[in-house]
Image (cartoon, rainbow, N blue to C red):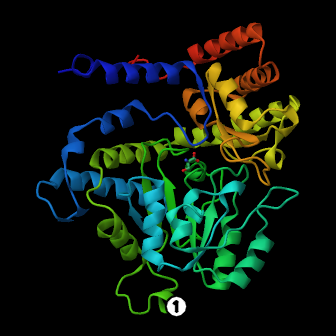
């Protein structure tokens, strides 16, 4: 029976969401639109199957075709990123980072990552997360003046703290991350380097951002952000050998790749989500095309034009602009909180998220900033000239919170844009 007939409530909510995505400007920088082929792979009978273990070594029968799918996804990840090993089973980014910790560390070991209020991720050592609770987190921040990562300061701190794991990566950092510099620091202090490229994986693949492959011991990426895949994550080892085996795992018979695989299963997870693995494989194939390279380049071009035009409307941008897919606006000069701006923009169909800015004096649930980005709009086909219009629409909305006529004009402007770049037309 069709979903529509069997469960009209859920069917309607899904249709409403299709329309929301089609008719609004999706600007949360960690979100994207997958292709119809990826969607098709996700909604398949693969969700019915258990396949604990790895290809050729499963704890359940009937995995002939699942093995084909998982091996294909692994091979595509290895080729796309240029790594020796890939594990495509993590359910998403947080479980994947948990697996990296489980593979490399013992509880209480020291980790050093970018602090959450300065743009880091919960799993990079934040106190309420497993990473801050079960490990000894000594977070670094950003420079007070420039809001940039200060590699000299991180080196000095790492020399003093001697972390076992150094983490390079962010969720709200608008500049390119210098993985090579992080690699030098990790080598100097004898730490593992985890590059969490969840936000910028698509930019790395497109060659617009530095690849962490030469520098990192382990690379983790979610698959659903700039990479344009389904929700999920991949853990990769550029080199299978454990560079610090003598120091940290002298008694272990496993190399780095084996430590990672054993941490994902049986360490933390049960059966992989095979429908997700298939969709990841499809997305990785798409990401290997010339079109995707153009897409990654366009994401950054669009973000830069958006940033320039927002500056023209007197918005204050953290670090003064962007090198990647995201922009962090500090709304302090607009007498508006991040929550108020998020709500105002939501009312006209512009979706962004409230976000702390570095050295924020407000609270996480009502911070001083909003975070916005270009991956999803670029996936629809938006170009530089469209981003100028988007900047105008954002400015109008923020500057005229109570004017109904302005709101009407903005809604009209958004409709013109979204009609020009339809998505999922076969689903509406
Ligand atoms: N929640 C993601 C983001 O929005 O950046 C990170 O996990």
- Write the residue at 53% across / 41% down: 292
> Residue 377's x, y, as percent?
60, 30
Residue 352 appears in which quarter of the rendering?
top right
Q: Secondary structure at mark 1?
A: helix
Mark 1: give few (<14), some (14-19) or many (20+) Cα within 10 Å: few
- Count of number-bearing discs: 1
Residue 181 position (above or below residue 351) = below
Q: Quadrant of the C terminus?
A: top left
Residue 174 position (above or below residue 122) = above
Dot 1 corresponds to which residue? Answer: 247
> Residue 187's x, y, as percent?
64, 81
Asked whether the viewer can see residue 297, the reply is yes
Q: In this orientation, which residue lies closer to the viewer: 128 or 35?
A: 128
Q: In this orientation, which residue lies closer to the viewer: 38 or 414?
A: 414
Residue 240 appears in which quarter of the rendering?
bottom left
Q: In this orientation, which residue lies closer to the viewer: 10 or 410?
A: 10
Q: In this orientation, which residue lies closer to the viewer: 45 or 284?
A: 45
Q: Is residue 208 left or right of residue 266?
A: right
Q: Residue furthest left?
A: 61
Residue 269 position (above or below residue 91) = below
- Write the residue at 55% across / 53% down: 198
> Residue 320's x, y, as percent?
84, 45
Q: Disc 1 beta carbon < 8 A from ligand 1?
A: no
Q: Quadrant of the N terminus?
A: top left
> Residue 290's x, y, as percent?
53, 42
Asked whether the viewer can see residue 424, the reply is no
Q: Is residue 286 left or right of residue 194?
A: left
- Write the residue at 47% across / 74% down: 239
């Amino acid at each position: 029976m069709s979903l529509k007939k069997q469960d009209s409530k859920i069917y309607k909510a899904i249709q409403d969401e299709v329309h929301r995505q089609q008719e609004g400007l999706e600007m949360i920088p960690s979100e994207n639109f997958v292709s119809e082929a990826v969607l098709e792979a996700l909604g398949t009978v693969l969700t019915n199957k258990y396949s604990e273990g790895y290809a050729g070594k499963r704890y359940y029968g009937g995995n002939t075709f699942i093995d084909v799918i998982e091996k294909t996804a692994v091979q595509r990840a290895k080729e796309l990123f240029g790594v020796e090993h890939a594990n495509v089973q993590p359910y998403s980014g947080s479980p994947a980072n948990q697996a990296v910790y489980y593979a490399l560390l013992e509880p209480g070991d020291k980790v050093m990552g970018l602090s959450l209020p300065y743009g880091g991720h919960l799993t990079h050592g934040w106190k309420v997360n497993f990473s801050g609770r079960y490990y000894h987190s000594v977070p670094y921040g950003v420079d007070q003046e420039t809001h940039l990562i200060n590699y000299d300061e991180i080196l000095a701190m790492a020399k003093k703290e001697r972390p076992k794991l150094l983490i390079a990566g962010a969720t709200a950092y608008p500049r390119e991350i210098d993985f090579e510099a992080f690699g030098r620091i990790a080598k100097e202090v004898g730490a593992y380097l985890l590059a969490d490229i969840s936000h910028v994986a698509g930019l790395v693949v497109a060659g617009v951002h530095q690849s962490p492959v030469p520098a990192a011991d382990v690379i983790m990426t979610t698959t659903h952000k700039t990479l344009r895949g389904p929700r999920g994550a991949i853990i990769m080892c550029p080199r299978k050998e454990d560079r610090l085996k003598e120091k940290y795992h002298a008694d272990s018979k496993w190399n780095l790749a084996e430590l990672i695989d054993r941490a994902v299963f049986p360490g933390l997870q049960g059966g992989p989500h095979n429908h997700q693995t298939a969709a990841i494989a499809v997305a990785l194939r798409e990401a290997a095309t010339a079109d995707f390279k153009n897409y990654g380049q366009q994401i950054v071009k669009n973000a830069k034009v958006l940033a320039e035009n927002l500056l023209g409307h007197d918005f204050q941008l953290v670090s003064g602009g962007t090198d990647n897919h995201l922009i962090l606006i500090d709304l302090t000069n607009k007498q508006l909180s991040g929550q108020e701006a998020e709500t105002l923009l939501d009312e006209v169909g512009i979706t962004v998220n409230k976000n702390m800015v570095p050295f924020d004096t407000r609270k996480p649930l009502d911070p001083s900033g909003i975070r916005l980005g270009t991956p999803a709009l670029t996936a629809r086909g938006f170009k530089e000239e469209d981003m100028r219009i988007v900047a105008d629409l954002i400015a109008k909305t923020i500057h005229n919170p109570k004017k109904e006529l302005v709101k009407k004009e903005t809604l009209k402007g958004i409709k013109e844009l979204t009609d020009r770049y339809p998505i999922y037309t076969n689903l509406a």
